[in-house]
Amino acid sequence: MTGVIHGVGLGPGDQELMSVRADRLVRGASHIAFFRKEGRAGRARTIVEGMLADGVVEIAMEYPVTTEIPLSDPRYNDVLAAFYADCRAQLRALAEQGTDVVVLCEGDPFFYGSFMHLYTRLKDEVEVKVVPAITGMSAAWTASGVPITWGDDVLSTIMGTLPEEALVAALSQADAVVLMKVGRNLPKVRRALQAAGKADRAVLVQYAAMDGQTVGPLSDYPKETLPYFSIILVHGQGRRP
Amino acid sequence: MTGVIHGVGLGPGDQELMSVRADRLVRGASHIAFFRKEGRAGRARTIVEGMLADGVVEIAMEYPVTTEIPLSDPRYNDVLAAFYADCRAQLRALAEQGTDVVVLCEGDPFFYGSFMHLYTRLKDEVEVKVVPAITGMSAAWTASGVPITWGDDVLSTIMGTLPEEALVAALSQADAVVLMKVGRNLPKVRRALQAAGKADRAVLVQYAAMDGQTVGPLSDYPKETLPYFSIILVHGQGRRP
């Protein structure tokens, strides 16, 4: 009997916004695994604090790099590929011994998540089950107090890491927008929003569904970088009765 | 003491994919309200079957029209606006009497949901709280067994009700796509996918996270219309280690 690797989406960060299934799997887990940066508690691990069974075995998968090597450097992919190969071997060995492992995933596992890199490597070797979750963007638009889309609005999720020209093109085509991975790309993102005629409607949500949640116009935010848990929204203006 | 109107997202349909908060609110509700078509059980009501407290008061809000009047007919908006005004009055009266009401919402309330029309009418009159949820599209891409986005992919959610030219433009700009509200627009959507060079990668997910879930290439689907619980996905092909 081989074990099952569960990729469990934890949602945006509030334990009450975990699904009933995720709650059950996390509380019942004998083995959990999670990504983190060396020296950090790890965001996914932090979300489940206080929920774990006594004696749970914890497997911290520590990223060898995050922002130290630029994405464009070929070494970035090489280092990460070796890292994911190690994680795969470790989880596969556990499953082959008959152990179920709950991999804790921030947000929704199949939506810009790190778990995808394990999933594609493991899915043909052992049983992998995925539990979807509330995305950070759903928490952000709920926090904003304004529905994100109406009628036939086209909603695009766009990463701030794109080149400026691609940002402008994607922003111009969409009626409603979710911008993620902005961080140090904020000046470029602001210029692109301006060029696409959407700067005045841009709303910044920080720490959605977490302690310290804030919502306000992006134009009121004075700094040049955004913290990690930040999402910029442009709400749709579509048809409504 | 006035009551609270809770707009509670139920997620894609599986009770275990409701959030812990939604589960608690639904089980504890003294009054629930939900939209449905006349003569039908109502999708949101069906999802919570077996979870309700004894003696719960049920308020069915029955759409006066759904597809009988075309969207382009000005009467469509008039009839719906009058309907939402009635619903607003009914819920506001309950809240003013001190009654909390749980409004059951399929999917995520602020993501193309009917609850938005009540929310905008009630939010300045009584306290309205919204619980985000797992979207139908998250359930669909999880069911597909393939992550929807990688790296910097632009993901667009696009309604099949758009004119063909707008569909082609939106489909062409995006790396990954979620198509909803396709129904009788399927022939037009197929042509637009072809024109945008994405027809070969289009995957049809029916009844995601529900009984009868199916996943397969759209090109294998022989009919001219899709059932209501259908989502077409085009997965992103972005950067990955």
Image (tube, coloured by chain):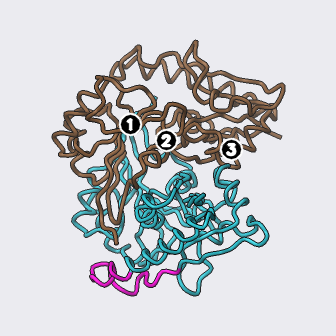
Chain colours: A brown, B cyan
Compared with A143, B16 (above or below) is below
Q: Earlier in the sequence, mark 2 or mark 1?
A: 2
Could you give the CA–CA distance between mark 1 and mark 3, rounded to whole angstroms? Answer: 24 Å
- What amino acid is found at the position of numbered circle 2 in the picture? Gly
Q: For this view, does A212 lie left or right of residue A177? A: right
Please check whether the numbered discs 1 and 3 fall on a single chain.
Answer: yes
Q: CA distance from mark 2 to mark 3?
A: 16 Å
Is the C-beta separation of discs 2 and 1 under 8 Å?
Answer: yes
Residue under label 1, please give it: A180
The chain holding disc 2 is: A
Does B174 appear above or below B159?
above
Q: Secondary structure at mark 1?
A: strand
- Of mark 1 and mark 3, the one earlier in the sequence is 3
Instruction: Provide the residue span drawn in magenta.
Output: B62-79
Q: Residue B63 lies in magenta, yes or no?
A: yes
User: A200 or A5, which lies in front?
Assistant: A200
Q: Residues within 10 Å of mark 3 (few under 14, many from 20)?
A: many
Q: Report the residue at 64% width, 50% height from top.
A: B19
What mark, if any, has residue A22 been given in the picture? 3
Q: Is residue A166 magenta?
A: no
Q: Which residue is mark 2?
A: A136
Which of marks 3 and 2 precedes in the sequence? 3
Q: Position of residue B83 (x, y in %)?
A: 43, 79
